[in-house]
Image: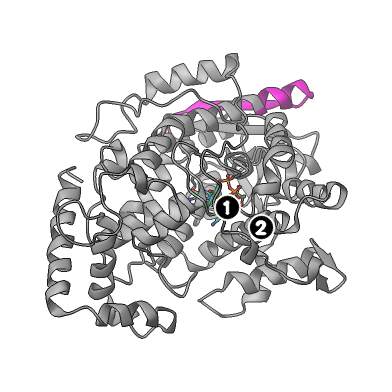
Amino acid sequence: MTVLVLGDQLNASVGPLADRPDDRVLLIESMGLARKLPYHPHKLTLVFSAMAHFRDRLRESGRAVEYRQVERFADGIKAHLDAHPGDELVVMRPPSYRAGERLRELVTDHGGRLTVVENELFLCSPEQFDDWAGDRSSYRHEEFYRFMRHQTGYLMDGSEPVGGEYNYDEENRQTPPEDYEPPEPPVFEPDETTRDVQSWVAETFDGAYDEPPYGGGWADPGPFRWPVTHEQALSVLESFVTDRLAQFGPYQDAMVADEWALHHSLLSPAINLGLLHPRTAIERVIEAYRERGVPLNSVEGFVRQVLGWREFTRHVYRREMPELAGANQLGQTEPLPPFFWTGETDMACLADVIDGVRARGYSHHIERLMLLSNFATLLGVEPQQLNRWFHAAYVDAYHWVTTPNVVGMGTFGSDTLSTKPYVSSANYVDKMGDYCSDCPYYKTKTTGEGACPFNALYWDFLERNAEHLADNHRMGLVYNHLENKDEGEREAIRERAEALRERAQRMEL
Ligand code: FAD
């Protein structure tokens, strides 16, 4: 018997790895998978270094680990079954679409047998979610989140939510004072294993991130900084709880130039690889509330993201694939502007965030949603092109989590996750961010040279999609504003938006 451990299941405390301590372990490092997209070098370093560390740790604990480095994943399965004919393998169900079925076919084709068991790196099982969801195909997060609070008892006093409310977002949505200096996020100096992986990644995948013809090789990333072991992931959690959790809630939606982490936990790269169990993160944060009096609005805000949103996206993806990946209900067809790869734009907000993504493969949630996705959606970019970019550019990206976030929430390609698009003009960017004061574009101008592109694109987006959106009662107010604009103003907006779309493609924004 062999426990097959996939690259995003690096956790020895759950599933077959924990249940079968004497069985052999198989890990397969596939270069083919790493070539599927122009991945950010930090993503590749993170995954391969975390796998190598995990292998070493299992071996140190006395386990027999076979680690196969191959071009195609199938080659690794074949080599294993050549060495152990007829072997029986067991694996936790991967969250990506049909991945479990494909693995089973692969093993069977080579004369083995594969049992796929539940993935214990998530908190809500498919049965639980399906019981809650019934036959619906449009899902509301808040309802699911309340269900999960009751199921798990997290932040509950019997059948009532702690503090009397399920959600304290009203107390959040603040911006930090000018010159605010958030705590320094943790950095992990690459050890010898990570340095070896870095060199190998540099030799093997050179040129991957910047897609030709837009750039000169890789994204010139900054120093690699992400946790690659369970211990390092725990130390990110500790530093979050000690230094940043208290202000997590209030500043969750804030955007500050040159401050890429603010009070976010930076835990997604580790959680999505299995290095940190979501339960560990939630329970540690609740402990800080109970023992140290960390404010409830921050604690609840964090619990909601992990217990609610993360589980929600996984299951909506599971149920709505394959349609979700290709969904494009607004019929958007614009190509992704090349500056998403290069960062070359005068728009201060986008330039700062894209530079950060190039440097470290990360930006926080509200930058992903209200800057990058918002801008791409207003411009009319096809959701699938944006999804591909997010998947390639971020260290925490996997198809199961980018797809609902980008195609569902970010671009409103599908209405399975939200009832209206997350779009805004420069108004929101200015309210929640501090970019506009140093930007050559004028945040209050809609048309004419120098007007902030978010403005004309916003009104143009509403007009272009009126048939689909104008009857949406949550959008009534903005459509009233649009109707109050006279035909001359609307024509100027259309012309400006068209010019901006062309300039975006020519990298002249
Ligand atoms: P925090 O702000 O500290 O949040 C805590 C944790 O909550 C995160 O670590 C994550 O595990 C979970 N979480 C929060 N929001 C979500 C969400 N919407 N979906 C799933 N988990 C959530 N998350 C990814 O893990 N991988 C992605 O590739 C990804 N792509 C995204 C693309 C877009 C367009 C948008 C709008 C969101 C995306 N998210 C993605 C969700 C979210 O932005 C990230 O989980 C978060 O920014 C990670 O940083 P953090 O760990 O500092 O999060």
Find disc 1 in the rendering and name its residue.
Answer: 252
Q: Quadrant of residue 7?
A: top right
Q: Does the magenta stretch include residue 487?
A: no
Q: Give the range drawn in magenta.
A: 54-71
Could you tell me which secondary element the residue under label 2 belongs to? helix
Residue drawn at x 59%, y 63% is 312
* Mark 2: C-beta under 8 Å from nearest atom of ligand 1: no
Q: Does the residue labelled 1 lie within 8 Å of ligand 1?
A: yes
Q: In this rendered view, identify the residue nearer to me: 115 or 198.
A: 198
Say whether residue 380 is visible: no
Q: Is mark 1 on a helix, strand or loop?
A: loop
Q: Which residue corresponds to the image point at 24% horizontal and 59% vertical from the top-left?
A: 445
Query: Quadrant location of the N terminus?
Result: top right
Q: Does the magenta portion include 58?
A: yes
Question: What is the three-letter code of the residue carrying label 2?
Answer: Gly
- Dots 2, 1 in contact, CB < 8 A: yes
- Looking at the rendered structure, the kind of residue marked 1 is Gln
Counting from the top left corner in percent of width and height, residue 154 is at 79, 61
- Vertical side of 166 occupied by 449: above or below: above
Mark 2 sits on what residue?
301
Q: Position of residue 336 (x, y in %)?
A: 26, 50
Q: Residue at x 43, y 84 (%)?
A: 473
